[in-house]
């Protein structure tokens, strides 16, 4: 395990209206406000989307299993924002439900707010962290540095 200790900085409360791309908007908020590290919480409605619901096997790099969120659903989500060399990236895990169907996974794309979606973003201060290339997984994973990298 690798870790750093930090504190809570600014807190942002936002509302996404029907049809807005909330993942892109969260990254834009981080860019605009220069939020280098954050944790966020989402509650409300989502339209569609693609989620990773696990790997197909145990091999590295993982081969993701994708599933669709069809139609409008209720959603609870939590995630982090850290920067890579291209800017801020939101990593979001959600549980979505409609009727008797519930799905949980990493929401990656093709989704937007339904009716209204609320977010609370809490900035993390006092740590230097970012999304760094991981050769084993082939992904950009959270990593720590002793200086500003991004």
Image: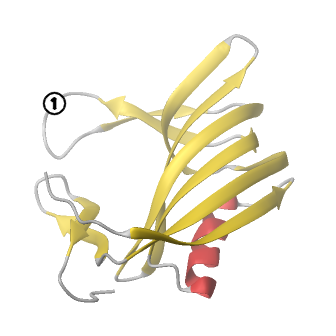
In this rendering, would 33 be left or right of 64? right
Residue 91 visible in the snapshot: no
Dividing the picture into quarters, in which one does residue 144 lie?
A: bottom left
Residue 91 % position (x, y):
45, 56
Q: What's the residue at 68%, 36% (across, down)?
A: 75
User: Observer-nearest residue: 112 or 35?
Assistant: 35
Answer above or below: position of 126 versus 138: below
Q: Is residue 129 left or right of residue 75?
A: left
The image quadrant of residue 143 is: bottom left
Residue 127 position within the rendered picture, expressed as x and y whole percent measured from the top left: 31, 75
Residue 15 visible to the viewer: yes
In this rendered view, identify the residue nearer to me: 142 or 121: 121
Q: Residue at x 71, y 43 (%)?
A: 43
Q: Position of residue 39 (x, y in %)?
A: 49, 59
Q: Which residue in the protein does label 1 denote?
A: 58
Query: Is residue 63 shown left or right of residue 117?
Result: left
Image: 55 above or below 126:
above
């Amino acid at each position: 395990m690798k870790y750093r200790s930090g504190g809570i900085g600014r807190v942002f409360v936002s509302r996404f209206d029907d049809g807005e791309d909330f993942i892109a908007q969260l990254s834009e908020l981080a860019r605009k406000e220069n939020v280098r590290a954050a944790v966020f919480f989402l509650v409300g409605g989502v339209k569609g989307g693609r989620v990773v619901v696990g790997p197909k096997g145990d091999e590295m790099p993982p081969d993701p299993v994708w599933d669709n969120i069809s139609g409008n659903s209720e959603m609870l989500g939590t995630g982090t924002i850290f920067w890579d060399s291209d800017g801020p990236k939101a990593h979001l895990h959600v549980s979505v439900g409609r009727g008797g169907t519930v799905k949980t996974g990493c929401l990656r794309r093709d989704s937007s707010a339904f009716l209204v979606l609320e977010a609370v973003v809490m900035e993390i201060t006092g740590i230097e962290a970012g999304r760094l290339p991981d050769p084993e997984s082939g992904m950009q994973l959270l990593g720590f540095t002793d200086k500003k990298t991004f």
